Amino acid sequence: MGDLLDLDLDLIDGSTTTLRDVADGGRLLVVNVASACGLTRQYADLQRLHAEHDDLTVIGFPCNQFGAQEPGTHEEICAFTEERYGVTFPLTAKVDVNGANRHPIYAALCQETDDEGHTGDVRWNFEKFLISADGNVARFKPATSPNDVL
């Protein structure tokens, strides 16, 4: 997973980093997020986990591929997440998690299998990937509560 951690990543503020730098030696919870989804309320639990666990960084990847549920601009996404859920964890620029333009990070993550044997495309908004400090990945279905992944 070393290559995964070192792939370039564009944050929503226009800066570039890597998952390794974002994790700063800890765990990562990578989540494709959307502002107009039935699962959007998961932002609250994601923010709580991010704030309560010093060794965990949540990182949200806004994606508009599922029901066009993330149509906003970067500024609108930031305003929504900050005002509604007090989000302080990093958000990336909008990405595709499936298809020909899939972000390289998701190309690697989609090779992982969840507890039901699903490998391949992300199924919906809020699919979660927990990456341990040593690079092991656990994959969780969108409906799985963020509270149940640690």
Image (spheres, rainbow, N blue to C red):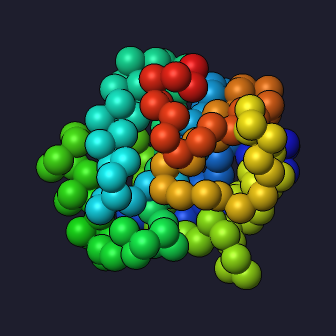
Q: Residue furthest bottom?
A: 100
Q: Quadrant of residue 147?
A: top left
**Is 91 located above or below residue 86 in the figure?**
below
Q: Residue furthest left?
A: 83
Residue plotted at (36% across, 40% down)? 42
Instruction: Give 109 or 141, whichever is nearer the viewer.
Output: 141
Q: Quadrant of residue 121?
A: bottom right
**Is 97 located above or below residue 33 in the figure?**
below
Instruction: Give 38 or 139, whichever is nearer the viewer.
Output: 38
> x, y (%) of residue 2?
84, 43
Q: Is residue 88 visible?
A: no
Q: Quadrant of residue 110?
A: bottom right
Q: Is residue 52 visible?
A: yes
> x, y (%) of residue 64?
45, 72
Instruction: Give 59 or 125, whichever is nearer the viewer.
Output: 125
Residue plotted at (65% across, 46% down)? 19
Q: Is residue 87 left or right of residue 26?
A: left
| Count of labels in the image | 0
Residue plotted at (44% across, 55% down)? 33
> x, y (%) of residue 46?
40, 34
> Which quadrant would the N terminus be assigned to in this image?
top right
> x, y (%) of residue 68?
40, 75
**Is 84 located above or below residue 114 in the figure?**
below
Residue plotted at (71% across, 27% down)? 132
Instruction: Give 142 or 91, whichever is nearer the viewer.
Output: 142
> Which quadrant would the C terminus be assigned to in this image?
top right
